[in-house]
């Protein structure tokens, strides 16, 4: 019986199924060939038909099942009747078999805030860099990111026609993170992942100060955290405002659940309560291991320029 499970684990199990449906919508929009691109604030700040449909799907599906949740999504959409086709009311039974960490067992629905990025890496989506794209559903309690789901709709898309497209990763603090193989960058290698489309002098100065062996420039905050947990990069460095709470909430959980660390550029934890400003105005610094090595190399000039 669903009622015997805690609110948090039911929410995560539902978010998993909802994220899988979201991934299918993302693929369908590409397959149909009309992305419906709209510029929001600039040529690098885009919205597509997939952003709109996925946000409607996620927010409506969650709100129907968990009416007391606070749900904050990236896209400003006019209220409209949502097509029944977009509603997902399933839940991933494997998650319900897992124990809820005791510190979260009595959480009520109204105590939770869900941060939704329906399509992280929209610019890359429009340019065909499909493995950069993720769907992010992050769950916060008392201002802290505690559970998250990441769907990567085009995982495996270059692996040939027989490959299964897409995957869903999930995690809860105190329980772990699942759906991927944890891997570390070889010891002594310093590989930085940073922004592909929002570069500036601050970002460059901070990356250079890390004395990297290699720099990867890719789209999507979710994608960059996946690079950290799968051994492709050792640090995600973004010394600039621009990244928002819905970009970092779910990925932060996955990283923290496997012993990594994500903060702003000053080393402050990010806050996710519903009243918080949406912008991560003091940037992002994240690592799977050796956080202090990278944090100690952030130039003072960069810190002074980025006010939390």
Image (spheres, rainbow, N blue to C red):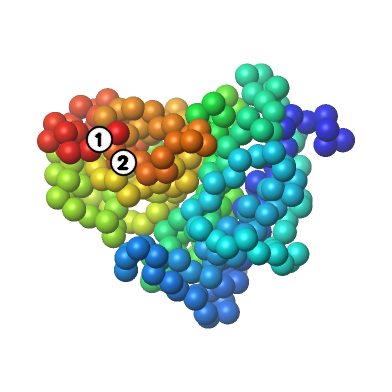
Q: Residues within 10 Å of mark 1 (few under 14, many from 20)?
A: some
Circle 1 SS class: loop
| Label disc, if present, on residue 307 of the rendered structure | 1
Name the residue beneath numbered marker 2.
Answer: 281
| Label disc, if present, on residue 56 of the rendered structure | none
At horizontal 65% and vertical 39% (from top left) the residue drawn is 69
Quarter of the rendering occupied by the N terminus: top right
269 shown above or below 184: above
Measure the alpha-carbon separation of dots 1 and 2: 7 Å
Nearer-N-terminus badge (1/2): 2
Quick one: 44 or 173, which is closer to the camera? Answer: 44
Side (left or right) of 59 relative to 153: right
Q: Position of residue 62 (x, y in %)?
A: 68, 48
Side (left or right) of 299 relative to 119: left
At horizontal 14% and vertical 31% (from top left) the residue drawn is 300
Q: Quadrant of residue 292?
A: top left
Count the marks: how many? 2
């Amino acid at each position: 019986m669903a009622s015997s499970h805690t609110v948090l684990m039911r929410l995560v199990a539902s978010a998993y199924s909802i994220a899988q449906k979201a991934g299918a919508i993302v693929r369908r929009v590409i397959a149909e060939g009309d992305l419906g691109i709209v510029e929001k604030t600039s040529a690098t700040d885009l919205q597509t038909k997939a952003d709109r449909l996925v946000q409607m799907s996620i927010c409506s599906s969650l709100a129907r099942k968990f009416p007391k949740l606070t749900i904050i999504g990236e896209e400003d959409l006019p209220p409209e009747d949502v097509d029944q086709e977009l509603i997902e009311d399933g839940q991933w039974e494997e998650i319900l078999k897992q124990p809820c960490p005791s510190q979260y067992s009595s959480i009520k629905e109204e105590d939770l805030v869900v941060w939704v990025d329906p399509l992280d890496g929209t610019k890359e989506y429009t340019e065909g860099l499909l493995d950069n794209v993720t769907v992010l559903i992050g769950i916060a309690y008392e201002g802290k990111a505690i559970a998250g789901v990441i769907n990567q709709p085009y995982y495996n898309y270059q692996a040939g026609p027989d490959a299964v497209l897409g995957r869903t990763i999930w995690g809860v603090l105190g329980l772990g993170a699942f759906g991927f193989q944890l891997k570390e960058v070889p010891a002594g290698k310093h590989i930085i992942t940073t922004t592909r489309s929002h570069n500036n002098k601050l970002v460059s100065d901070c990356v250079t100060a890390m004395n990297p062996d290699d720099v990867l420039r890719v789209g999507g905050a979710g994608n960059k955290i996946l690079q950290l947990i799968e051994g492709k990069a050792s640090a995600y460095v973004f010394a600039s405002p621009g990244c928002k709470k819905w970009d970092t909430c779910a990925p932060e959980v996955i990283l923290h659940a496997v012993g990594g660390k994500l903060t702003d550029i000053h080393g402050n934890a990010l806050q996710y309560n519903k009243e918080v400003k949406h912008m991560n105005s003091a940037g992002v610094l994240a690592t799977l291991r050796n956080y202090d090595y990278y944090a100690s190399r952030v130039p003072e000039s960069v810190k002074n320029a980025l006010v939390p």
